Image (cartoon, grey):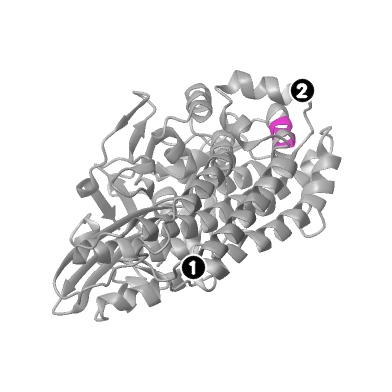
Amino acid sequence: MTRLLVGPFNRVEGDLEVTLDIEDGQVASARVNAPMYRGFEQILQGKNPHDALVYVPRICGICSVSQSVASARALADLGGITMPPNGQHVTNIILATENLADHLTHFYLFFMPDFTRSVYAQQPWHAQAQARFAPETGEQTRAAIAARQRWFTLLGTLAGKWPHTQSIEPGGSTRPVEAAERIRLLAKVREFRGFLERELFAAPLEFITGLADEEALWAWHAQDPWRGDFRLFLSMVQSTALTSLGAGPGRYLSFGAYPQPGGGFAFPNGVWHAQTQALAALDEGAIREDATHAWLSDTQGPLHPREGITRPDADKPDAYTWNKAPRLAGEVIETGAIARQLAAAQPLVSDAVRRHGGTVFTRVLARVLELARVVPMMETWLSQLQTNEAYCVPSPVFTEGVGVGLSEAARGSLGHWVVASRGRIANYQIVAPTTWNFSPRDAAGTPGALEQALVGAPVQDGEATPVAVQHIVRSFDPCMVCTVH
């Protein structure tokens, strides 16, 4: 058996290292290390609860809106606040803008460039991959960067700036939308729709979301295998092992995405189990964070986040990461777009996961389909804004109590827990999507989702950064700075 350290990874937000034990040309075991400590949970202690809305967006430069939304929901829960419908719609649009930008960035800038590597030089699509997806110079890479830049101008109108947006409050959005602005915003959403329909899918969004199963997907692909970037990706899937590479734990968590006025979500919450092929109710109270193998104090054992402790212990024996190990009812969980689409019973994703499980292919498939599903939702939310109705209600003075804010970032389930005492934050804990997916082993020695997914990955002779490992890691799209908050 040999040991291989892979990292630091490029095209990853934050620092990441993976230690692999290699036996007979494949990964026998893996340990995932988040080597950077930032301490936001400690920084927030003693602050005015409302000040969290200034601090938490600065956890991350690419998913700052997600942190703002989760924090605002925690404070809304603490203060018993309900957003007016306009505020809910605009908050959803702001969050969706960031989430879809992350999906676009993941596909074009993080995931697809690995197919330009020389290991694939003999594949019939390699020249196309280089022309389209080469970092900085690929024609589609450049087109996606331009589309992303124009897409983010939505947030100039709705939120003043991005990242570190400050317009999201517990009571809604502080920036009302005028009638003329709504028309301009809708035009920007439709421009983005045009990019997706022209470049990514080469088909209408509604056609893509209407594909009923994998058989329909491959039949459509066969009509013109290289037309559009999504179909080129499918051609790559056909000639590689992506359908079986990187199998996860088979349990998928969604906190529910884009809550709607009057109740419910655009994408439901729950836990989807591969064994039963069914969605179970979410029990937030069953979450525990295990710090056995983190460089953090674990003297009190696994704790629910509202009682969580973030106390560094850099010399702790048997620790290998700054990341805690969250578990739901003691089980390892995977989260992300794949979880949201399984919870929503999206037909194509459900069929693909039934056939292959949670793999590199099905994770990327779910993210791409979410682009097609959410853009029409944004058009609807803009049309539902009511002139002269409130966008935000005032927040009370936050003094005592506990608040929980659950949301869905691009990478998956994000939770904020705030405990207030005498008008100050007594405790603030965050469990981010990458905290779930990139968790270390727990007290029972059970590996986290990525650690499990890496087992069995092929490693070719002489590979210092195995391409299969790169594909698996990038299919989860890690955001390490959110992990080590």
Q: Position of residue 170 (x, y in %)?
A: 31, 66
For mark 2, does the 10 Å Cα neighbourhood hold few (<14), some (14 to 19), or many (20 or more) residues? few
Task: Report whether 196 appears left or right of 356.
Answer: right
Quadrant of the snapshot with the C terminus: bottom left
Span highlighted in magenta in the image? 232-236
Looking at this view, is 347 or 478 the one in front? Answer: 347
Q: Quadrant of residue 467?
A: top right
Q: Quadrant of residue 24?
A: top right
Mark 1 element type: loop
Which residue shows up at 47% across the image and 71% down it? 165
- Vertical placement of residue 62 versus 248, above or below: below
Q: Position of residue 327 (x, y in %)?
A: 30, 47
Which residue shows up at 47% across the image and 61% down it? 34
Q: Earlier in the sequence, mark 1 or mark 2?
A: 1
Q: Position of residue 463 (x, y in %)?
A: 70, 47
Looking at this view, is 242 or 112 the one in front? Answer: 112
Q: Mark 2 belongs to which amino acid?
A: Gln
Q: Which mark is residue 91?
A: none
Residue 317 in view: no
Dominant secondary structure (helix, strand or loop) of the stretch shown in magenta: helix
Task: Report whether 363 appears left or right of 255.
Answer: right
Which residue shows up at 57% across the image and 64% down it? 180
- Vertical placement of residue 407 versus 312, above or below: above
Looking at this view, is 410 or 436 the one in front? Answer: 410
Residue 268 in view: yes
Q: Position of residue 298 (x, y in %)?
A: 24, 62
Q: Within the magenta stretch, is there residue 228?
A: no
Q: Which residue bears the numbered disc 2?
A: 223
Q: Which mark is residue 60?
A: 1
Q: Mark 1 belongs to which amino acid?
A: Cys
